[in-house]
Image: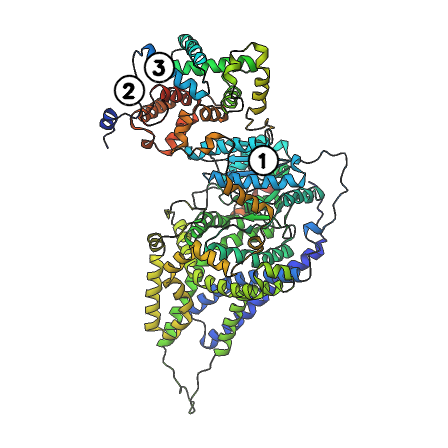
Amino acid sequence: MAKSVQAPIMGHTLRRMMFFLLVILTTLIALGLLVSVFHTDGLSPMELLLLLLYTILFSWICMSFWTAFMGFFVILFGRDRWAISRQPPATPPDPAAPPPRTAILMPIYNEDSTRVFAGLRAIHRSLAETGQLDGFDFFILSDTRDPDVWVEEELRWQDMVRALDGKGRIFYRNRPENTSRKSGNLEDFCTRWGGRYRYMIVLDADSIMKGETLVEMVRLMERHPGVALIQTPPVPVNRESLFARILQFAGSLYGRMFTAGLNYWQLGESNYWGHNAIIRIQPFLEHCGLPKLPGREPFGGEILSHDFVEAALLRRAGWEVWLAYDLEGSYEEIPPTLIDYAKRDRRWCQGNLQHLRLALSHGFNALSRLHFAMGVMSYAASPLWLLFLIATGVEAYLQTQQELVYFFGENWMPVWPVSFAVEMTTVLLVTLTMLFLPKLLALLLLLKDGKLLRAYGGLVGATLSVVLETVFSVLTAPVLMLFQTKFVLAILMRRAVGWPPQQRGDHMTSFKEAALAHGGHTLIGVVAGVLSYRYVPAFFWWFIPVLAGLVLSIPVSMLSSSIALGHKARELGLFLTPEETEPPPVLRYLEENLEEDEPELPVLREKPASRFVQALTDPYVNALHLSLLPQREPPGKRRRHYLEGLIHQLEEEGPDSLSGAQKRDLIADPETLLRLHALFWSRPPANAGMLP
Amino acid sequence: MDRGKVGAAHPYLAPPVAAPDGELLFSRLGAYWRALGVTNPAQIAALSEQALRRAVELPETPGLDPLARVLAAAGELLDDWLARALELPRPSRELAAARAALLSGVAPDWPTLLFAPPGEAEPLLDTLREFVAEPTPEPVPGVMPAQRIELFSLLGPLTRLWRQPTGA
């Protein structure tokens, strides 16, 4: 592989040593305070458990805190001199070398086609404005199974090609089988067309990236041939519900500090977040083929969260992986409601827990192991917090059951119990500081840049937003803790949690949905509140923030999903982000595309009840779909019988009697597709409007 | 649900006609040609006649009633012309793509050119070539071998020690 170009190894080591020393020292100090409280009369098993949990959880908070703290200074004093964007080129550019070709990949799976293509068009337009469009091709890599969405995607793709004169530059394919999900989708691209390109930029269905950013990513890769992957920090945008706007604000304001901090101590051993990243294709092909893990799910089988593993494999092979924290113009959309946020967590949880096995695998770099461990802790922290809270409550109860003895042994003077209020208050204050100081630091950073401060709503608006965001995060944290605990336990017990797919677009949470999702949380909050008030009244008052979050979970979930409240908050200058205050052109293009949506293809202007039926009846849609089917062996005898049965079912009972998979099977076979087209025209269904 | 009863009472598609008369054949063919963009009645009549003749040449397809067979022949007729004019193999994705391009509205006067002398259709063919969809580029196959990940096990270090001498 190409020679590494990163900054002196000594500097890297110093940064990491400093980071880990700070984490360890802070943890030890807090632990020391707690031990001094517990140790007076020996350590009980419960106290030992508390100490162990506190150590794990506090070190987890410490890592986050020190990352933010380092990020604070990086931004305060200007840019990081060892950032990938600041490093000189490893080798002088070869003027004779052919210009690089880059594929922009958008893997999709049953997504809203209108949004997907509106986003792609916005990116295309932004890229065209840089004058560098020729170096890029676009691939829509569909794993969509829903037949209606599949046909819609094909039409939208063709419309985009027509509108942007994109023949030979904008491609579409739908995989017959979605083996290995997203990682399999990308692998399919790499093994079929990867050889045509030097780089691929991987997007998500809701990713948006500025053209300039895309060009800059390629430029950085060209300058640093030892780098295999550059991740950009995606900023959350475009949502309008109160919940999403609060998260967007937090992600935007605090996120830049955290990413700067992460880059500060991780440098060329950073991580991959699965999208909004550029990848050098050759090393990816050579080193990132994912194996199946031995054993059963949840820890065995296909690797679900492939991104962390791919980054670790690249690092294992000696390639650098960077987080370009200072590269702006990378955006994503986030779930619009608390419930949708939890649904996304459910999908991610299993993949991250699987990393537990990988963290201990042979051959990975130390920092890759840490990334795996951090992925595990993102979810494992919740059951640990819950356990910690329960253990604290039990310990507090046990303490209330002990009678104080003032005279013992041969003492004739009373022995007063020692108060540890100072130590306990210090522990609490240190923990709270670790949790909330980064928010304050992020706010302070705004004072450095007046324009940025105004973009966040001015000093008053930004401060008020931070305060309200803090209250909101305190209220939702216990709910997310219970959700994630449930997910972790369900996965460990191999049980399905059984939720419908996540809805990406803005929508209100109904009372029924909220009650079903949070009824249990409310009940737990009430019972825990009554028990603690009855048996450990002193603990009850400390416990109130957690209890309040649980008891109020239904109204908080419903109200925060409100788009009207999101708009109102915006009118009041709350939770503003620079992307809202002054949207960059690429986000404006997306909005325009969604608002105008005037397709070139007449067939797209119609909104038929079913695109599946349209693929059978409309001669153009039928021919286009036929032309996009992959060439396959003709179906075998059993398959033909199966398809024959489906045709008869469709003839007799109509499309509503067929499942999505059955409809897909019918339109995935070229012969069947043509036969059904002829059948529909010879014996049109009533009210189909096919005959004059 | 008793599917048999539902199917027998109200089938979704109209029941097949075993021996359709000429009026029904021309009516269905006319509707289909109009859906393809042919509006001139004389052209519709001529194309329908050709489709009827083409239907006789079609190989037997189980499950296609006589009316559906004639309609399939109409599609074949169009493909015959496209394959000949654009020199495309059949059946092929390219041919289907050419048919899609033809029906997409880029050349609304295609029915007239279908009946014109060969040289006059050239501009139409150029337009079609330009608008034929190209869903994917030519592949450049590569391999992506599955990587070995040696998961942690308590016996792992011993296994590695065991392997080392034999490997050497």
Q: In which quarter of the image is residue A164?
A: top right
Q: Which of marks 1 and 2 is in front?
A: 2
Picture layout, residue A243 above or below residue A225: below
Calculate the distance from the C-alpha at mark 3 to the C-alpha at mark 1: 43 Å
| Drawn side of residue B28 relative to residue B117, left or right | left
Q: Position of residue A233 (x, y in %)?
A: 59, 51
Same subunit: marks 3 and 2: yes
For the point 46% across and 62% down, the residue is: A472
Q: What element carries label 2?
A: loop
Question: x%, y% of residue B29?
Answer: 39, 15
Q: Can you give x and y, in whole percent of width and height, for residue A302 in the image? A: 48, 41
Viewer can see residue B168:
no
Quadrant occupied by the N terminus of chain A? top right
Residue A138's disc is: 1
Q: What amino acid is labelled 1 in the image? A: Phe
Secondary structure beneath dot 1 equals: strand
Pointer 3 chain: B
Label 2 belongs to which residue?
B15
- Real-space Cα separation, disc 3 to disc 2, in angstroms: 11 Å
Q: Nearer the viewer, residue A280 or B155?
A: A280
Foreground mark, 3 or 1, reads 3
* Of callouts 3 and 2, the N-terminal one: 2
Instruction: State the residue position of label 3.
Output: B67
Q: Residue drawn at (38%, 69%), measured in percent from left and top?
A: A394
Mark 1 crowdedness (10 Å alpha carbons): few <14, some 14-19, many ≥20: many
**Chain bearing mark 1:** A
Is the residue marked by circle 3 packed among few (<14), some (14-19), or many (20+) residues within 10 Å? many
Q: Which mark identifies residue A678?
A: none
